[in-house]
Each structure stands twice: as structure tokens, then as C-alpha cells.
Amino acid sequence: MTEQYLPVLVTFAFSAAVVGLMVSLGRLLGPRHDSTEKGEAFECGNPASGSAWGRFSVKFYLTAILFIVFDVEVVFMYPWAVLFRRLGWFGFGEMTVFVAMLGVALLYVWRKGALEWD
Amino acid sequence: MLIDLLIAAIKALIVIGMVLPLAGILGWVERKGSALIQDRIGANRASIFGFAGAGLVNTLMADPLKFLTKEDVIPAGVDRLLHTLAPCIGLFPAIVAFAAVPFGDVLEVGGRVINLQAIGLNVGILYVLAMMSLGVYGVVLAGWASNNRFSLLGGIRGSAQMISYELGMGLAIVATVMTYGTLDLQAMVRAQGHLIGGWIPAWGIVYQPVAFLLFLIAGIAESKRVPFDLPEGESELVAGFFTEYSGIKYLMFFMTDFVDVAVVAALVTTLYFGGWQIPYLMRDGVHFPWGTVVALPQIVVVLLQLAAFMIKVLFFCWLQVLIRWSLPRYRYDQVMRLGWRGLLPVALLNVMATAVLVLALQG
């Protein structure tokens, strides 16, 4: 069972080597001339307006939370999708209840305006 | 054991050797395609030591060489470790996701049956989804580590967009998995070798046209290309999440882009267009529906399958280039509306409709 994961390790090793080689070759072959102007954050030629590590819109957090909620429910559907022929109408009934709850949740966040971007 | 390791290594090298040049070729096709569509002369051939005769080959060599020999500027205020790590985290999952796609049936050499798929997992599609969703870390870390307002905006826009479209994509795949009854990509392609009524190839598009459209839209949004290129948004965010990148790291973000295009094209081919299947071509030759059988040696069949896979993948890559140069960019609220209020409900309904249809036909 586990030997089918051996190719995964091999592919990971090769891909990591390719990616690592690219970064290190770029560092070796490229010239380096550091200066204060070059070290500034690029803001279209204006003097940099300070660090960007501050607050940003809370909407993005909300999207991430909603994603987690719905994605976990999508993951629940995969085992059923593989076996639903064998589970038949009983399994379908169970899944209908589940999807109905998902639909109500989607409707709720929709009506609450959580999916609005102004 | 050792021979298994060797075969795995060769297959991995073949796939990586296939996808990296493909990304380079796509970079050229994109520039050439834009010139074609905009009716102008474009993408001049590179001349290496005065020799420009080899066209595409020259460009393929010149592009990485040029990027390698440019300065890799790391601005003063950045998080240096994450700044270097971000393009790696972006490119790595895209390459390893491509490795799970089967590019042929089986090859028998000396009594050993080799599955023509670098990573043949029984949960193949889950593995691909897992790897594709890792790509979001490359975007968000690049945006965050750069310590630049444009980069940060691009990075968080990109992450919100990518996770939103993952829902639609996941549900489109759920419906597709239901028609095949397996998560194994190679088994899915084999299932598409059957014929409906003896004539029509049983490709996924026949059973799941809605899932195909959903998957294509979500796939383009996942690869952050026009009309979903807001994380990059060059008219408002300079270059979005990779504003502060130069040299080879900039090239790596570009390659991630094109490898993503190749992954989406390969998955569309595998799930909905028969993968390496050619209609009527079986393992021992061509079986026409009217009964004629043309026997072919095994190596010819394998090469034909490989060619069919490549042609289908290139076609869907070209389709994405065509879309990229034909459509304007969405506004951000439109992107989110399409993902959450369009793709998600439609994909849910598609899953339920598939279940009802399959169970009713099964009786």
C-alpha cells in the first residue's frame, strides 16, 4: 500500500532540486549592486510610504473563514461520491439532508451580506 | 525494489522534462498569440551569437539564460527568507501536481508492466487538488514578504480568489468522480475508453458538460489569468504579488503561471476529454465500430496515445491563451460574486442532479 507513495517522494525530490537549482543559479550568475534607492519598496517612483505590514480589510478574513466552512463540507462529499452507487437512494437521502443544510448556510451568509464586496 | 525506484525516477524525470519546456513554449506561444490576435508583428526571434535560425529553440534557450544573468534585487525592507522561499513554494506544487496526470496506458517491457503515469495513486485526484491548493501559499507569502503595499494587496486578493474558486472546482470534481466511481486518474481515463452505443466515445464531457465548464472557469481563476488576473492587475498594482521580484525569481512566477495552465489543460483532458484515449484505439490496435480491426504493435499504440495526450493538452493551453487575449479583466466584486453566488450553487445543483440521474438510470 505504501509503495505507491515512493514515486511521490522521488518526484518531490526532483522538483525540489529543480526549484532549488533555479534559485541558487540565479544568485550565482546574476550581478549584485545594492544601493539605498534600489532597496526601497517600489511605489511607482514616489518615495516609499512606509511599511506595508499593517492592517487590511477584514473582508478577506471573512472569505477565508467561509472557505474553511464550505471546503470541509466539500471534502465530506468525496467518500460518498466514490461509493454512492452502492449506497443507493438511502445514501442519496442522507446527502440531500447534508446539502440542504449547506444550502441553508449559503443562503444565510448570502442574505447577511457576507458575500457582498463594495 | 531498486528497479522500481529507477523506473519511478525515469518517469519523474520524463514528466518534469515535459512540463518545464512546455512552460517555456507556452511563454512564447502567449507572446506570439497576442501578436496574432492583435494583428501586429511580435515576439522577435532571439539571436544567439548572430544565429537566429532556430526560432523557438533559440527563444527557449535565451529566456532562462537572460533571466539567470540578471540581478536578483532583494529590497531592504523584505523578509529575506520568505522572499526567496515564495517563488519556490509557488512553482514546486504546480510541477508535482502535473506528475499525477497519466500520459499513456501501460508499456510492457520484459514481462514488467509499466504504468505510464509518474505518480499513480489510488487517490490521484485528491492528491492533485491538495497540491494545487498549496499554490496559494506562494502567492500570499510573496505578497506578504515583499513589504510593499501593492504586493500585499495582490497577495491577499490572490489568496481570497484562489480559495473561493477552489470550492467550485472541488464540487465540479465531486460530480465527475460520481460518474466514474473512482478517485484514480488512470482508472478514470480507462473508463473513458468505452463506447456509448458502439459509436460515441464515452468521454467525460458527454456525461458532465456542466462540470467541465465549471472546472474550466475555476481552473482559469486558480491559475490567476485574465479575466481573473486581479492578483497581478498590472494597470493598478504594478505587478501585484511579484512587484518586488526580479531575475530568476520573477521567471519562476511566470513559469508557475504557465505550469498552472498546463496542469489545468492536462486535468481538463484527463477528466473530460479522454486523457490519452483515441476513439476506437485499443491496446492491440484500432477497432472500428463497423468491425474492421487494424492490428498495431504495442510501441506504436503507446506513441499514438502519448501524441493524443500532448495534442489535447496543447489545444486546451491554446484555448486558455485565446481566452487570455480576448476578455477584459473582471472587477473584484464580480470575481467574488461569480465564485460564491455563481459557481458554488450551480456546482451543488450539478452534484445533486448527477446523483438523481445516475441512481434513476441504475434503477
Image (cartoon, coloured by chain):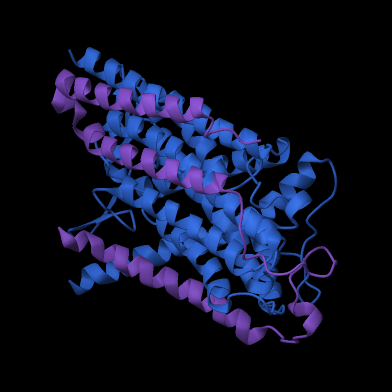
Which residue is drawn at the image coordinates 64% and 51% (left, top)?
A: B231
Q: Is residue B300 left or right of residue A83?
A: right
- Residue B291: percent from left, percent from top: 30, 22
The residue lying toward the viewer, choosing from A95 and A19, is A95
Q: Is residue B28 left or right of residue B15?
A: right
**Quarter assignment of residue B239:** bottom right
Q: Is residue B183 left or right of residue A52?
A: left
Which residue is drawn at the image coordinates 65% and 40% (left, top)?
A: B332
Which residue is drawn at the image coordinates 80% and 59% (left, top)?
A: B44
**Quarter assignment of residue B210:** top left
Q: Is residue B101 visible?
A: no
**Quarter assignment of residue B174:** top left
In the depicted structure, whether residue B169 falls above or below residue B195: below
For the C terminus of chain B, which image quadrant?
A: top left
- Residue B13: percent from left, percent from top: 41, 67
Q: Chain B's colour? A: blue
For the N terminus of chain B, which image quadrant?
A: bottom left
Q: Is residue B34 left or right of residue B263?
A: right
Q: Is residue B145 visible?
A: yes
The residue lying toward the viewer, choosing from A93 and B250, is A93
- Residue B191: percent from left, percent from top: 28, 34
- Residue A60: percent from left, percent from top: 55, 47
In the depicted structure, whether residue B171 falls above or below residue B143: above
Which residue is drawn at the image coordinates 78% and 83% (left, top)?
A: A36
Q: Chain A's colour? A: purple
